Amino acid sequence: MAFASIHVPNFLVQAAVRAEPRLRARAVALVDGTPPIWNVVAANEAALQAGIELGMAKSQAAQFRNVEIRHRSRLQEKSAHAALLDLGASISPRMEDTAPDTIILDIAGLTSLFGSEANIARRLMRHASSLGLIAHVAVSSNLEVALHAARGFSGITLIPPGEEAKRLGRLPVRALLPSAEILETLERWGVRDCAALAALPLLQLSERLGQEGVRLHELGRGASLRSIALAEPAVHFEEEMALDFAVAELEPLAFLLGRLLDQLCARLQARALAACAIRLRFDLEDSFEKDFQVLSENSPAKLAPKTYEKVLGLPVPMRDSKMLLKLLRLQLQSDPPHASIVKIILSAEPARPRAAQGGLFLPSCPDPEKLELTIGRLANLVGNANIGSPELVDTHRPGEFRMKRFVPASDESRIFHKNGNAPAAHICQEDHTSNQSRAATAFRIFRPEVQAKVELQDGCPTRIYFRGMRGNIVTASGPWRTSGDWWREDTWQQDEWEVDIRFDSSASSRNERIPNSRAQDGLYRIYYDSIRAAWFARGRYD
Amino acid sequence: MAVNLATLRSKVELALTGRVAAPFTYRDRHVVETVSTGIAEIDSLAGGLPRGALTEVFGPACSGRTSLLFSALAARTAHAEACALIDGCDAFDPYSAEAAGVELKQLLWVRCRNIEQTLRATDLLLQGGGFGFIALDLSDMRAEVLRHVPLDAWFRFRRAVEDTPTILFVLEPESNAKTCASLVLRMEAEPTRWSTTLETSSADFFRHPFSWLFDGLGIRAEMIRSRMPRNAPNGFQNHFASVGRSEVFETSAVPGYLTVPRIEPAPK
């Protein structure tokens, strides 16, 4: 049995630095409290060396010009703790969530997977670094020993079985987290490290300090035994950031989103997962002008929403933060929030990463990630409603269809064949001798439909005027009556005709904007709309 | 002299190191792979559609350009290739395409409103890559507008599909791509075919219009240009010799009032 404990020293500051990596090389102090009383609650080594002290008032701390003052953020701490749990889950599913800054892993039996215990510890350090955290790692066969060694010693600490008491001897008693009263007593006795504590006679210590003293004695000797309290694996991937100043422009917002996405993707990677959807939520600043305008109309119900939400659905699970950022930017460009942003909440819906096997004989298919980006750019160009894969709907209403997301099937067997024939085994050996059946005549639709004037003779159309052109109908077939949806407001009732039109050339020669009318000769589909009592041209065969 | 040439050659190669792999190596033209259009007459005329090249099909309205497009799309989508249609005038009819055998799930339809959007969308799709067939439908645009498309746009499109398996298929009212197109076909309408239940000699359209049915179009396709090599694979040879030759094929009607949407059952 072996345990690895991971401890993030100075957790509050590290959580802040993780959200703002440029602070890593700076002196940082965190303040917290009830306004207007703000006190320093945490500071890194550089800040302490510069003269910052814990408990100092914010106004005093602000005197230090080279120290960055930040407000403590519970959101950042929550994200950092979630990242720490993801770090543990990347190595072992058996994990104890000991404290916000500490976790313990059961690493028994993992040496065959990751190598020696030293390798596991190095791997944990590396993963922690990729998640933006600097961690201390300790490995021991005793859970409590690993826990206190990680809290007390920096870097990697490997404690072989039997050497627990010796290695913990140098550990200050403070690292065992005794109560303030007992710590004071021990300090008065001159007991400063675990070696001195372990040397005390247990019976007398018990008489003077009670059960707490016995517990500390066991901890100091490395003899305390307890079972691991397994944590429920969390599958909630969310990163939040509260902004000191509202952001209104896309560029700085993209910078912040990129940072959050990096963290989110690193967490997903730690769990060998990817995102199948990204949910974006902005808390928006109150927009004074709009609210003023709305309030002046005495209609409080019309107040603009204070949040902005967007879901970026992905066709395949992804965890490339750069690609996700590009997609989010495209979404935000096409539909920007209506006010400045004060808080960003980004969450990912986890899914197993895509595992695809390429094939020499498979048809060419766009890479799903690149395709999503291309579709995003095209949607930005032509509008979301104007791109996708057309889907027929179960109706006889002319021209009715809907657009759906384009997800091409790369596997031939998934393609539905109307004739029921199996597709060719290898597309490289394509048969050029096409089947002898005739090609279907294609139809082109006029969107929107073109209103026309039609002259009738015995109920049959003989002349037509539309788009500034005048033509004789030389052949007509119809009328073919269709109607439907009588229960809806937009019911339809039409008499369709297929007409062969020969246009006069005189009209187009007078007006340059009218196309060469003789080149427009051909077979058209026109209809009389009984409800609107008007003729329209639906389209033409081509 | 020979020594000087060798020195010069080595200097040029040294200067181009990292930019050009082998500046003096003759880049042999790779074998052009062609695929079927789905219409036997066009395949026998042009040898199919060349991959990695621009194919231009032009002609007046109702000349069968869209029928050829749908037939090619049906053939490509039947082989599970991802296809894209950049619709310059938003004239695509999904019902008609479905009736022609196009697998709509494999088709990305981009509905544009003007020529700028259309050209930009084409650029984006070509840069994205991975599509087996990209159709650029400019059929209903005014010829004057298309004449103003700069020639470098066509060169850019040709360059973008070179050395890829993509077929770039352009429909226009008149030819504009000039030398950028590897295959140019001109389409012309032949008389429309009608069928009737009456005696053909005495039948009158205007007295009995309901007794006549549109039967299909006759279409003449003429090959204006082909850059396919003389010994093309798949048994098609000497296509330079067939420039100017034409073939007539016929299409069958799929009347609108008979078009029944094919709805696949929802997956269980």
Image: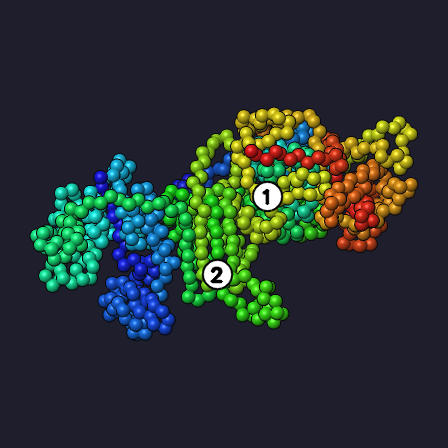
Q: Are marks 2 and 1 on the same chain?
A: yes
Q: State whether residue A354 is above or below residue B142.
A: above
> Disc 1 is attached to a residue of which chain?
A
Is A3 left, or right, of B254 in this rendering? Answer: left
Is A263 left, or right, of B28 in this rendering? Answer: left
From this viewpoint, is residue A533 visible? yes
Image point (9%, 54%), residue name: A204
Q: Nearer the viewer, residue B101 or A201?
A: A201
Distance, label 2 to label 1, CA atoms, is 30 Å
- Residue B209 x/y as whole percent: 86, 36
Label at residue A404: 1
Q: Nearer the viewer, residue A100 or A208?
A: A208
Which residue position holds label 2?
A283
Tell me the quarter of the image containing the C terminus of chain B: top right
Label at residue A186: none
- Amino acid marked by disc 1: Lys
Image point (38%, 52%), residue name: A263
- Residue A166 x/y as whole percent: 12, 48
Q: Nearer the viewer, residue A238 or A457?
A: A238
- Amino acid marked by disc 2: Asp
The first of marks 2 and 1 along the sequence is 2
Image point (33%, 49%), residue name: A85
In this rendering, the count of numbered labels is: 2
Q: Nearer the viewer, residue A297 or A387?
A: A297
Quarter-of-image position of residue A445 = top right
Image point (68%, 49%), residue name: B146
> Disc 2 is attached to a residue of which chain?
A
